[in-house]
Amino acid sequence: MGFGPFLLLDELMPDVALIQALKERWDPECHAFLFPWGHMIPTLEDVARITGLRVDGQEVTRVTYTSYQELAERLLGLEVTRERSFLVARTRLQASLGVADTRHQTREGRRTDARAALAEEEGAAADCDLRCFLILVCGKLILGTRGDPVSCRCLPLLEDLSSVGSYAWGASFLAHLFNSLGTPSRETGVAGFFPFLQVWAYYHIPSLGRGVPRRLDAVPLLQRWRFCRDEQSLRLQVTLIHDALDTVPFGHWTPYVGEDDAAQPWVERCRPYFGRDIWLHAFNTVVPFHHRLVARTLGLHQAVVEFPTGQRPWERPGRSFSGIQQETDWTVRVCEQLTDWEHRGREVASEDTSDEDYFCAYARRYGAQVYKGSRRPFDHEGQIASLEGVLHSTIQQRDDFQAIVTQLREELDRAQQMVGGASSSQEDPGRSVLEGQLAAVVA
């Protein structure tokens, strides 16, 4: 089914401070990290190389339901007591597989217990247990939820076990990660498979010194790193990471040069999806991946592009799944974005000969947001760019607000026409009062 490399990954101690520091630099409008040197985004290639998950194939989406009770009982053999729920207790899934008490066992001990529990099963019983295992993998690791329960959204895709390996689970993981990073910064951590984000930072920003290389030839790349333990307080660690990010020298580079792709056949298979602007799907989570913002990761010079400034209704068709929701067929609701995925999006290219124009535009747009540390570098040009960023942001907010006021005035006109109001605004005292209030707000 294509999960082999992913399931063989070693455990990695969580680097909570690094994940929190990265989350505080995430911009949910453009789905990218904001650093002093520009945008950075985990890519589909990063997912394939670090985790071994497949990022090509069928999109991970179908129908979401108000209740998964019938599916859970029929496909997992588990009774669901809460009718309108999409969550199943992790411990119940583990108990059904005979591996309920695994917290303090070694990896080999868990494998032995699982083999003993499943060795004698065949037919429908074996299929049921396989689905329970896959729900743990997909619903807890790849598309993980916060807390102990496991999501059942993947159940419709597991009914036909012969097709499970055809789905782009790695692409759905990236969509889920982007959605999780967009939660309020006061919520620490991210849902799902956190080691990916750690190793992504270890590889792309090694000067932070948060990870230590161990097996240099191991694949997937997550096998090459271990966490460098830090005994300082979490808040101090986060502050020091921000200080380091504010001063990291960053040049023009191309990642993964010299990698032996022969040892990673899943990477070669997924290559047609690398380096492209494309829509990512994870059931009701549909997010745009703006690879054009990080053209430098392709070895290209970064061209000036239009920076995304807001989430429009067609960008995020629905909120992240959270409990009761109407039954929705996402293959119909987001057919345009699904077609984009099927055509592999749009290739990113650049004819620029330098990054200077991009950096100037980036400073004007984000100058006031990119520095998070306690010791900002003394850089006159950077300070000027920061002030320009504040000014640009204020002007943008003013223009947006004026557009809202114009829309309100148009709605007032329409409402007056519907109720058969006076022929001119001057003859309507109520309208005059509202106009005065709008003018005061604009002022």
Image (spheres, rainbow, N blue to C red):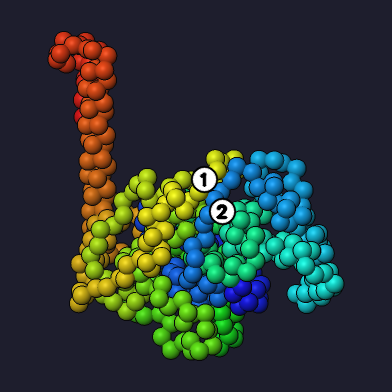
> Which type of secondary structure does the marked residue at label 1 adopt?
strand
> Do we see residue 168 in this rendering?
yes
| Horizontal relation, residue 314 to residue 126: left or right | left
Residue 33 in percent (x, y) is at 40, 61
Q: Is residue 222 above or below residue 17?
A: below
What is the three-letter code of the residue carrying label 2? Thr
Q: Is residue 339 above or below residue 330?
A: below
What is the three-letter code of the residue carrying label 1? Thr
Q: Would you identify the image quadrant in which residue 40 lies?
A: bottom left
Which quadrant is the C terminus positioned in?
top left
Residue 3 in percent (x, y) is at 61, 73
Q: Which residue is mark 1?
A: 328
Between 386 and 37, the residue placed more toward the observer is 37
Between 325 and 322, the residue placed more toward the observer is 325
Between 152 and 185, the residue placed more toward the observer is 152
Give the CA distance from mark 2 to mark 1. Answer: 30 Å
Is label 2 in contact with label 1 (beta carbons under 8 Å)?
no
Between 59 and 223, the residue placed more toward the observer is 59
Instruction: Name the residue rendered at 65%, 66% in the picture.
Output: 161
Q: Is residue 1 above or below residue 328?
A: below
| Horizontal relation, residue 413 to residue 297: left or right | left
Instruction: Name the residue rendered at 60%, 60% in the picture.
Output: 157
| Horizontal relation, residue 232 to residue 114: left or right | left
Please rate how many residues cluster around mark 2, counting C-alpha atoms within 10 Å: few if below 14, some from 14 to 19, many from 20. Answer: some
Residue 34 in percent (x, y) is at 37, 61
> Do we see residue 373 in this rendering?
no
Residue 19 in percent (x, y) is at 53, 62
Instruction: Name the residue rendered at 77%, 48% in the picture.
Output: 79
Q: Which residue is mark 2?
A: 188
| Horizontal relation, residue 286 to residue 405: left or right | right
Instruction: Name the residue rendered at 67%, 64% in the picture.
Output: 134
